[in-house]
Image (cartoon, rainbow, N blue to C red):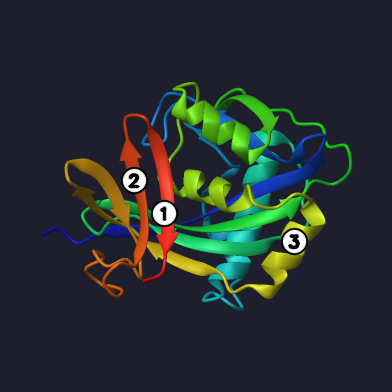
Amino acid sequence: MPTQQVHPAATVVVVRDGTEGIETLMLRRNGRGSFGGMWVFPGGRVDPGDIDPTAPDDELAAGRRAAVREAREEAAIVLDPDSLLAVSHWRPPSSVPKAFATWFFVAAANGDVEVTVDGSEIHEHSWLTPAMVLQRRDAGAMELAPPTFVTLTLLAVHDTVDRLLDTLRAATPERFHTQMGDIDGTGALFWHGDELYAAEPGPAGTHHRLLMTDAGWQYVRTSA
């Protein structure tokens, strides 16, 4: 089996308080590449210039700088790297030959921020509540990658930016290394703790998975 090439990357979920709850900035990528046409958060690959030569192994610091740079390049948003709170780290299945190991951060928008997309990598933007994005994905109006879907599902339970940020400050970022599979013919992704996760299975009856049915996606996390 070929050795997987893993490249560090970072993305930032920019949030603000809206009339119907927390809103997230969603960007639609152009039709090229592995994320072509998808709605994403600002982000991309960690460049050499994002790495501090005095601390080359500090992946969180490099990720914050990369996420801030990408937000500026893709949407003209200026963020303070120190304001970014780490949420999770995602790595695709080991069978993917060229993979991105991606830090996900959350940051509050600075005031009444004006978004200007670059028109090259990004063709459209929208501020939406997480619930709206999830509903549009299931209706076929927006295409999402699984980490984006799961992150939005986790954000949807918070009603204000301050409460979300307080929760994140008290939490430890979680690492997701995806495993692909199916359940009775239904496509599924599995993560640590699930009873069917080969690398780190949980007890019987424990679920940590994304079910991808034709009717919609569902992130399921239960204990035995």
Residue at figure coordinates x 69%, y 35% from the top left: 75
Counting residues from the start of the chain, the first of labels 1 and 2 encountered is 2
Left or right of residue 145, residue 172 in this image: right
Q: Indicate the position of residue 189 as horizontal and vertical percent values.
A: 31, 52
Near-viewer residue (103 or 212)? 212
Q: Secondary structure at mark 2?
A: strand
Decide if residue 39 is in sight here: yes
Residue that label 1 marks:
220
Residue that label 3 marks:
165
Near-viewer residue (201 or 77)? 201
Residue that label 2 marks:
211
Left or right of residue 20, residue 46 in this image: left
Query: CA–CA distance between discs 3 and 2?
Result: 28 Å
- Foreground mark, 3 or 1, reads 1
Dot 1 surroundings within 10 Å: few (below 14), some, or many (20 or more)? some
Q: Amino acid at mark 1?
A: Val
Is the C-beta separation of discs 3 and 2 under 8 Å?
no
Q: Indicate the position of residue 64 as horizontal and vertical percent values.
A: 64, 60
Q: Amino acid at mark 3?
A: Leu
Q: Secondary structure at mark 1?
A: strand
Query: CA–CA distance between discs 3 and 1?
Result: 23 Å
Dot 3 surroundings within 10 Å: few (below 14), some, or many (20 or more)? some
Query: CA–CA distance between discs 1 and 2?
Result: 8 Å
Q: Secondary structure at mark 3?
A: helix
Decide if residue 29 is in sight here: no
Is the C-beta separation of discs 1 and 2 under 8 Å?
yes
Quadrant into which the N terminus falls? bottom left
- Tell me if residue 163 comes above or below residue 198 in the rendering: above
Residue at figure coordinates x 34%, y 55% from the top left: 92
Counting residues from the start of the chain, the first of labels 3 and 2 encountered is 3
